[in-house]
């Protein structure tokens, strides 16, 4: 006679030959994060002079985004490939989108961006119409200029960092850590140019909150693409307001 314990064991046992999904060791991940920040700090503090020497804004943008892609994205795919982890699925670039979650995300992001416009209008004393007044050609140029960087940033910080952290911690803990890392990645350049000013502190807090928002959007929609879209929309709006 088969006991209940044996029955549960039989029901939960994995099929013969089935192995657990590959997982990047936390120690390897930690080393990866440290190496990234070391390389990126050199780039942001020293090699940024190369960008500043380029006269054409178009080629400067192309060069900057190419370097960012090589530092932020390529090593992610290489690392996941070495550990036999399918990158597109792991980074949530090929996972099916949760349509209900996508709709909720769109509403929340729209509310966030609306509050940003209202807040900037109150701080600057400008009307919302004047802040957003741009020729259509300027809008297209600005959209093209802010569309590439968010892809690299979201692949690294939400696709890779957040998803790996979420394997070891609760979502909101992982999301907060990845958002802190996201803010930290902006700090070397900002601090070297402006020091720890009130404006820099405000920007760091803003980037942290955005990182939390983008991470939540990815979780809610089960895809990285809505987070990338929200990131592009935020950068585009920022360009319209401050550009």
Image: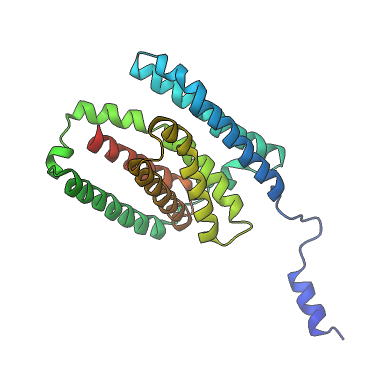
Look at 77% across and 61% down and name the residue there.
15
**Horizontal side of residue 203 vs 241, given as left or right:** right
Look at 80% across and 81% down and name the residue there.
5
Please state which of residues 94 and 58 is positioned toward the viewer in this rendering: 58
List x then y, in percent, for residue 169.
60, 60
Q: Is residue 23 visible?
A: no
Q: Is residue 182 above or below residue 62?
A: below
Q: Is residue 237 visible?
A: yes
**Horizontal side of residue 122 vs 67, given as left or right:** left
Q: Quadrant of the N terminus?
A: bottom right
Look at 25% across and 53% down and name the residue there.
115
Q: Quadrant of the C terminus?
A: top left
List x then y, in percent, for residue 4.
79, 84
| Name of the residue lying farthest toward the right | 1
Q: Is residue 165 above or below residue 68?
A: below
Quadrant housing residue 216: bottom left
List x then y, in percent, for residue 193.
40, 30
Q: How many marks?
A: 0
Look at 79% across and 73% down and name the residue there.
10
């Amino acid at each position: 006679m088969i006991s209940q314990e044996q029955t549960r064991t039989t029901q939960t046992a994995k099929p013969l030959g089935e192995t657990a999904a590959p997982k990047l060791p936390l120690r390897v991940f930690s080393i990866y994060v440290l190496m990234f920040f070391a390389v990126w700090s050199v780039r942001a503090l020293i090699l940024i002079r190369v960008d500043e020497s380029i006269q054409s804004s178009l080629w400067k943008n192309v060069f900057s985004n190419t370097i960012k892609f090589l530092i932020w994205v390529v090593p992610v795919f290489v690392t996941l490939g070495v550990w036999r982890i399918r990158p597109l699925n792991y980074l949530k670039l090929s996972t099916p989108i949760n349509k209900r979650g996508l709709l909720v995300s769109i509403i929340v992001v729209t509310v966030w961006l609306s509050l940003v416009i209202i807040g900037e209008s109150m701080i600057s004393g400008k009307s919302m119409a004047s802040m957003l007044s741009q020729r259509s050609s300027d809008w297209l140029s600005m959209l093209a200029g802010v569309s590439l960087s968010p892809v690299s940033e979201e692949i690294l910080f939400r696709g890779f960092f957040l998803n790996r952290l979420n394997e070891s911690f609760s979502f909101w803990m992982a999301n907060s850590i990845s958002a802190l890392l996201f803010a930290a990645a902006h700090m070397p350049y900002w601090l070297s140019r402006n020091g720890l000013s009130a404006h820099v502190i405000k920007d760091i807090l803003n980037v942290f909150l955005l990182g939390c928002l983008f991470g939540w959007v990815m979780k809610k929609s089960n895809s990285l693409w809505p987070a990338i879209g929200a990131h592009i929309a935020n950068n585009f709006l920022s360009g319209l307001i401050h550009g």
